[in-house]
Image (tube, helix red, strand yellow):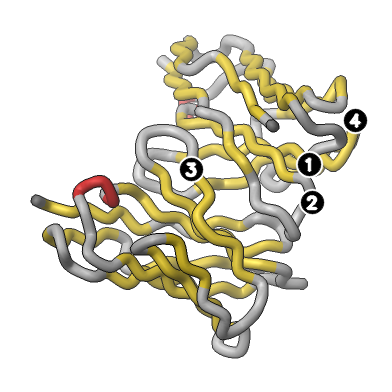
Amino acid sequence: SQTIHQWPATLVQPVGSPLSLECTVEGTSNPNLYWYRQAAGRGLQLLFYSVGIGQISSEVPQNLSASRPQDRQFILSSKKLLLSDSGFYLCAWSADRGAQPQHFGDGTRLSIL
Amino acid sequence: EDKVVQSPLSLVVHEGDTVTLNCSYEVTNFRSLLWYKQEKKAPTFLFMLTSSGIEKKSGRLSSILDKKELFSILNITATQTGDSAVYLCAGVNDMRFGAGTRLTVKP
């Protein structure tokens, strides 16, 4: 069966520091991968999605970037974090964008001080 | 611009009540509508709706899609405290989520 791993679960970082969040999927090949951010009490905002290695689409201009160095690995990064980057970050995968539901990791709660 | 609007934003009911959550959408190249339940962490998948008028059911939960009027509803009958969560809907083509409905079920 397919599983998705996301880490770390919580992270506290100072303003201006770099960020790297990692997500890996097991039990499937060539998944569609997604990064979302959820502000407190809000819905999910799609940040990036990827349909294959090295293929990244950005939904919102921001301080973050994403990379997909391997088929089942998706990384969210920042060179310099802002206070506004605080939130709950979720990684998800789906077998077919639109025709199959997404399955989410447990998320990373990021606090910027 | 694509958008998904959920209502109400929050709802408080007592155990045994029936609730209806609403989701309206305007999504280019619409393919499907998804419902999720989010408690503490990861949203968990509930329903995927692609065809109009066909009810999907899972226990006390059911959902239906109206592609003409561009909305979907999620019904929960005989609510329990364990149904307390944020319920999210997403319109696909591009997985655009609504803000969610926070449901609180009191004993």
Secondary structure at badge 3 equals loop
Q: How much space separates mark 4 and mark 3, taking CA atoms?
A: 25 Å
Circles 2 and 1: CB atoms closer than 8 Å = yes
Measuring from the top left, give residue A94's x and y in whole percent.
Answer: 72, 44
* Residue A21 marker: none
In the image, what residue occupies the spot 45% across and 16% down?
A: A10
User: What amino acid does circle 3 point to?
Assistant: Pro
Check disc 1 and report the residue beneath it: A32
Looking at the image, is mark 2 or mark 4 nearer the viewer?
Answer: 2
Write down the residue under mark 3.
Answer: B43
- For the residue labelled by badge 2, is the local secondary structure a helix, a strand or a loop? loop
Give the side of residue A6 with respect to residue B36, left or right: right
> Measuring 54% from the left and 14% from the top, which residue is drawn there?
A8
Rate crowding at label 2 as few (under 14), some (14 to 19) or many (20 or more) other CA atoms within 10 Å.
few
- The CA distance from mark 2 to mark 1 is 7 Å
Above or below, comparing residue B88 to residue A52 in the picture:
below
Quadrant of res B75? bottom left
Specify the quadrant of the image occupied by residue B97: bottom right
**Nearer-N-terminus badge (2/1):** 1
Residue A81 in picture, x, y percent from top left: 57, 19
Question: What's the residue type where badge 4 is placed?
Answer: Ile
Q: Position of residue B46 (x, y in %)?
A: 50, 55
The chain letter under disc 1 is A
The residue lying toward the viewer, choosing from A30 and A69, is: A30
Q: Which residue is mark 4?
A: A53
Category of crowding for the residue at label 1, using alpha-carbon neighbours closer than 10 angstroms: few (below 14), some (14–19), many (at least 20)? some
In space, the residues marked 2 and 3 are separated at their CA atoms by 18 Å
Check disc 2 and report the residue beneath it: A96
* Residue B70 in sight from this viewpoint: no
